[in-house]
Image: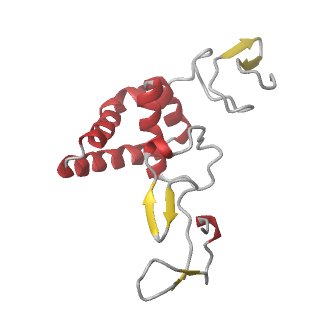
Amino acid sequence: MARLEDLTRGAHVRGLRPEGPVEVLDVKWHGTSILEAKKGKVRLLLRDEMAADWSPATDRRLTVWELTQHLIRRLEAAGESAAADLLRQVGSLGDVARDLAYRLYSLCERKGWAQDALAYNGLVTAWPELTRLASQAPVVGEAQRSRSCGCESRYTRVGTRSWCGCSSKRG
């Protein structure tokens, strides 16, 4: 099976049309880990299938869809502070994610997809508190993503030096 990363202009892809292969006219990437393509079918990954260690700082193809899903994931798994930390990292793109969450909530509500509707509504409802927390400077000792190792351990600060509590290299 070919990977999405292998798609280039001029490539031929089978399984999309019954008449035979189609030629790729152009490729524009919109994210690194939001789609799955198997046996001619393409689908968006479920929130739980997305990388747990995702960071907007290292994502070269950040999408609003991906950001929205990770905001919900952090909100549900680690609470408002963790979601606000992510919101702080993405700046004004967060407002677009909130708008998408509202639209997706409306769609899920109309389609009767209660579980997804609750997740999107939860993000929209928490938004005022998330923006308030995101506007504040991070609190030393609050769970944050370490730039050196990528863990989410608590920081220890002595003077001007700080390090996380994991077993990787100390900074």
User: Which residue is nearer to you in this view: 107 or 147?
Assistant: 107
| Residue positioned 47% across, 87% down in the render | 20
Q: Farthest top residue?
A: 158
Measured as percent of width and height from the top left, residue 144 is found at 60, 25
The quadrant in which the N terminus is found is bottom right
User: Which residue is nearer to you in this view: 161 or 37?
Assistant: 37
Q: Is residue 11 above or below residue 56?
A: below
| Residue positioned 42% across, 26% down in the render | 132
| Residue positioned 28% across, 39% down in the render | 115
Is residue 92 visible from the viewing direction of this image?
no
How many numbered tags mark residues here? Answer: 0
Is residue 35 visible from the viewing direction of this image?
yes
Residue 161 falls in image quadrant: top right
Measured as percent of width and height from the top left, residue 26 is found at 55, 78
Measured as percent of width and height from the top left, residue 66 is found at 48, 49
| Residue positioned 43% across, 25% down in the render | 80
Measured as percent of width and height from the top left, residue 79 is found at 44, 24
Image position of 44 (left or right of 167)? left
Q: Is residue 60 above or below residue 138?
A: below
Q: Is residue 8 above or below residue 127?
A: below
The quadrant in which the C terminus is found is top right
The image's colour scheme reads secondary structure
